Amino acid sequence: MWRRASAALVALVAAGALSGCRSAAPVSPVPTNWPELAAPVRPFAALYRLSCCGQRNLVLAVRGDGERLSLSVAVPPGGAVLAAWLDGGRGWVERAKEGCREALPQGVLPLSAKASIPLDPGLAGRLLSGLLPAGSREDAAAAGWVEATSSELSWRARVEGPDPHLTRVVVARPGADMPLLDASLGDPRGRVPGSVALKAGSVKAELALQSWREADPPPAPAWLASPICGGGR
């Protein structure tokens, strides 16, 4: 089972077996105030430098509220790469050069025309906000980790303190041997991670936070009125 394998991996790292060290400090337990991170996502607007898919210094703009997510990727000084809108289980991506929109598979967040990661708007909002899902609990099999499981996904997070913040998030399907997504979080700005390194299969991406602010919930983009590519409904 993926969870048992992950717990064993954490134990090996704590023992120094993977680093070649004969001794190493044990993994710190999860901070007692970690439940502060299982809070609702507050509407936000964020700007990142994005490296993904063979391109660097892309500009990623994100707005979210835990249920909806709007994002755009551009090449400075303003050349648009893509725009996407996710609302619950449904999402759309704009093909600006063709003047149309295309439906996204459920639970997919695009980063380029050919690369995407398995995140729905709720999980994406929590990851970027440095928050845990509701119903999270300490992982009894791995010190310092918190877990949450739904019918579709399991979420495991490494929480460090004393001010609790996430340093790693692993998302998988329950019972699966391999994770869908592995995210390393660093440079915390309070709870919000200042850097995010993502790996999902062959897709690797790095986000460097440029600005973060509280905002109104994201409005539906005007391009949702564009026709569906290929004439579908």
Image (cartoon, rainbow, N blue to C red):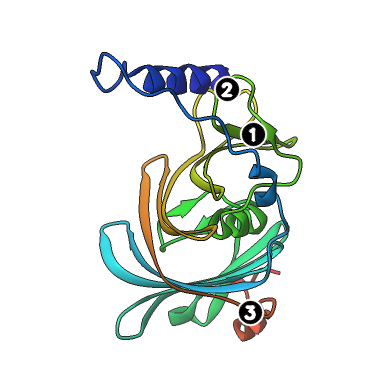
**Which of the numbered marks, if any, corresponds to residue 121?**
none
Residue, disc 2: 3
- The quadrant of the image that shows the C terminus is bottom right
**Which of the numbered marks, if any, corresponds to residue 215?**
3
Image vertical order of residue 40 relative to residue 32, above or below:
below
Residue 46: % across, % down: 51, 72
Specify which label sits upstream in the sequence, 1 or 2: 2
Closer to the camera in the image, 220 or 158: 158
Closer to the camera in the image, 26 or 209: 26
Q: Which residue sits at x=64%, y=43%?
A: 34
Disc 3 crowd rating (10 Å Cα; few below 14, some 14-19, many 20+) is some
Q: Which residue sits at x=62%, y=51%?
A: 107
The Cα atoms of the two marked residues, 1 and 2, are separated by: 10 Å
Q: Which residue sits at x=73%, y=60%?
A: 88
Q: Which residue sits at x=61%, y=67%?
A: 92
Q: Amino acid at mark 3?
A: Ala
The Cα atoms of the two marked residues, 3 and 1, are separated by: 29 Å
Cβ atoms under marks 1 and 2 closer than 8 Å: yes
Residue 53: % across, % down: 32, 56
Specify which label sits upstream in the sequence, 3 or 2: 2
Closer to the camera in the image, 138 or 216: 138
Residue 89: % across, % down: 71, 56
- The quadrant of the image that shows the N terminus is top right
Residue, disc 1: 147
Image quarter for residue 70?
bottom right
